Amino acid sequence: MIDLLTTHYNYVVSVLLFGIGLYVVMGSDNLVKKVIGMNIFQVGIFLFFVTIGYVDGGVPPVVGHGQTTFVSPLPHVLILTAIVVGVSLTAVALALIIRIYNGYGTLDESVIKEVQVDD
Amino acid sequence: MSDVQLPVIAILLTFVVCAALAAAFLRDILSAIIAFAGFSFGVSIVYILLRAPDVALTEAAVGAGVTTVLFLLTIVRTVRPGGDRLFERIKVVPALLATGLVAVLLTTMRSLPRVGDPNSPVATSEITRYYLENAYPQTEVENVVTAILAAYRGFDTLGEAAVVLAAGVAVLVVLRKEVYV
C-alpha cells in the first residue's frame, strides 16, 4: 500500500479529496460549507484528469520549439472548460443560498428543516 | 516525475490535503473560505509541476480568485455563525461513508498506470498524437491547448460560454428584489 504513495501519489490525493468533499457535502450543516465541499470534490476530479495527461520528462504542449515529448493536451482542455463551468455552478448555488437566508434567516440545514415541518 | 521534483510535489500535496481538511473541519466560515483559497492555490502550483500552465493559471484566477470572492460576497450578505469551538464535531455516518468511498477507490488504484508513465493509454493515444502532430499545421497556433480549445473543440467552448451566460442570468433572476417582480 505504501508503494502507491511513490508511484500513484496524485491519484491517492484526488481520492482523498473525493472523501473530504463527500464528507463536507453530507456532514456539514452549513449550506456554504456544503458548496465548499462540492468544490473540493471537483478539484479532486480536476487533479485526476490533469495527472492522467502527465508524461515523465514531458514539456507543456507548445509545439515548434524542438522538443519531442509533450504532456497530453486534451485533459487540460477538458479541465479548463470544467473549471469555468464549476465556478458558474458555485455562483448559482451561492445565489440560491442568499435567497434561502432571506427566507429563513439561517444557513443551518437542520434549522431550515424544522421551520419547514412547523409550516 | 523526475527525482528532483518528487520531494517538492510531496510537500505540495501534503499542503493541499491539509488545507482541504482545514476547509472541511474549521467551524468558522471565513476561516474555511480562506483555507479553501489556499487549497485552490496549492492545487494550481501542482498543475504547474504537471506541466499544465493553462490549467494552473485558470485555477489560480478562477478557482482561488473568483470563487473566493463569490464566497466572501455570500457571507457578507448572510451570516457568519459564531461559536467557541474551533473545529466541527465529526459526524459518524458521513465519515464512515466517505471513508468507505476512499477505501473502495484505493483498491482500484493498482489498475491505473503510474504517474508519468510514458506507456499509459492517454500518452500513447491516437487522439493525443493527432493533436500534437496536426495542431500547428492545421491551425497555426503553437499552443496545442489553445488550438484544441478554440478550434477543434470550439463548440465545446461555445457551450461553456452558454453555461456562463445561463448562470449569470440565473443569479440575476434569483437575487432580484421582490419589489421589482
Image: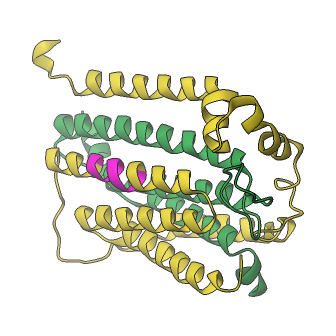
Chain colours: A green, B yellow
Q: Main secondary structure of the magenta part?
A: helix
**First to last magenta residue range:** B63-70
x then y, percent, for residue B89: 36, 74
Residue A119, picture quadrant: top left
Residue A88, picture quadrant: top left
Can the viewer see residue A25? Answer: no
Q: Relative to A61, is B8 on the left or the right?
A: left
Residue B65, magenta (yes or no) = yes
* Residue at the (78%, 40%) spot, across then down: B131
x then y, percent, for residue A20: 51, 66
* Residue at the (17%, 71%) spot, across then down: B83
Quick one: B132 or A50, which is closer to the camera?
B132
* Residue at the (71%, 80%) spot, across then down: B2
Q: Can you say whether B36 is above or below B149 in the image?
A: below
Quick one: A110 or B10, which is closer to the camera?
B10
Q: Can you say whether A87 is above or below B164 in the image?
A: below
x then y, percent, for residue A109: 32, 49
Residue A100, magenta (yes or no) = no
Q: Can you say whether A97 is above or below B80 in the image?
A: above
Q: Name the outermost residue toward the left.
A: B179
x then y, percent, for residue A25: 46, 55
Q: Name the outermost residue toward the top.
A: B181
- Quarter containing the C terminus of chain B: top left
Q: Relative to A40, is B73 on the left or the right?
A: left
